[in-house]
Amino acid sequence: MARPTIAVFTKNRLNPAYHAARLGADRVAARMGAATVHYVPQQPDNVGEQRALVDAALAARPAAFVFVPVHGTHMDAAVQKIRAAGVPVFNLINRLRNADDYVTFVGADDHELASRTGAFLYAAMGGHGDVVILEGTPGTISSRERTRGFSDAAQGFTGIRIAGARAVMFLYEEGKRAMQALLAEVPRIDGVAATNDSMALGALEALAAAGVTAKVVGINAIPDAVGAIKTGRLLASADFDAFKISCLATEAALRHLRGESVPKQILLPVQVVHAENCAPWDRSIEARECPDWDTLEGLHL
């Protein structure tokens, strides 16, 4: 039998989470006797470019797509092309809005990730203070649900006020610029809730340059964020491990191609990562291990 090829779509080469996702796909494919081809827009999160990459991938006739859409709705027509070609789609991280468009979705509950991380931040602030939210790429479900989670968590703390927000891409430099803009607009900032770690780390740089002290949280638990937690610069993150998610999506694809039944949805558990529990995440992406498929029954929902 010919070795199956998996077309792996990620959003950009700047966000460390997508490097992790590509590595996870490669690792599982190698273990299961498959090949991967990566399709990444040169311009980060570019809809037109990802559409063209879908056409290029279909011309190469892959066995399956492991697919992170760059936008929550603007890739619908391109996904319909994949379905029309009879190629199964395994959706990860950013959920496609039509459940019929994918065999399996792998991710986490974005609202719960943010609400629990936000509550951790607000409690660490003593339940009082002004907070700004760094939202993610407009049009993504992750950004929308994480922003809503941070806002909803604040309702449980009468002394917490959401004093401002900025919507930018999920990237380090974007987070730094957004934080600089908020520092110029918001008189007082006691806490920063960033919808991913790259933006949180960028915000830390902007805060340090401005001489402002604020508690900052992110989401992803990437190695650089864990390092910042260990040194006390970052208060906390949440475990949204794109490496593990991609491992599972790729394994679901290859099991499906073998004729095995796979779940419609796999959601990883929500865990807030902070100074007292960060040891398991304190390793490089390359040193992390893919989850054991046979132990994941509780995640198949």
Image (cartoon, grey):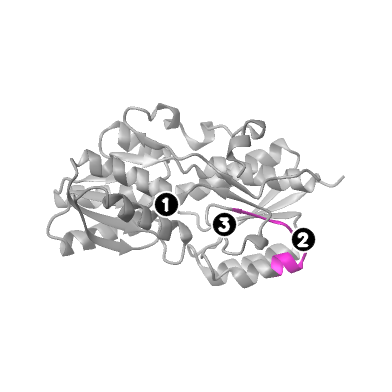
Q: Classify mark 2: helix, strand or loop.
A: loop
Whichever of labels 2 and 3 marks the residue nearer the N terminus, that label is 2
Instruction: Residue at 50% x, 47% y: name it.
Output: 108
The tag earlier along the polypeptide, 1 or 3, is 3
Question: What distance separates the C-alpha of mark 2 from that of mark 3?
Answer: 18 Å
Tell me the CA gap for discs 2 and 1. 36 Å
Q: Position of residue 66 (x, y in %)?
A: 64, 53
Where does residue 51 sit, x and y in percent of width and height? 61, 69
Q: Which numbered mark, 2 or 3, is in the foreground of this view?
A: 3
Residue under label 1: 111
Name the amino acid type tagged 1: His
| Residue at far right of view | 1
Q: Which sits earlier in the primary sequence, circle 2 or circle 1? A: 2
- In the rendered image, residue 106, in percent from the top left (x then y), is placed at 58, 48
10 Å crowding of disc 2: few (<14), some (14-19), many (20+):
few
Secondary-structure class at tag 1: helix
Do the residues under discs 2 and 3 have CB atoms within 8 angstroms? Answer: no
Q: Nearer the viewer, residue 195 or 116?
A: 116
Q: Which residue is label 3 attached to?
A: 68
Q: Amino acid at mark 2?
A: Arg
Circle 3: is it few (<14), some (14-19), or many (20+) Cα within 10 Å? Answer: many
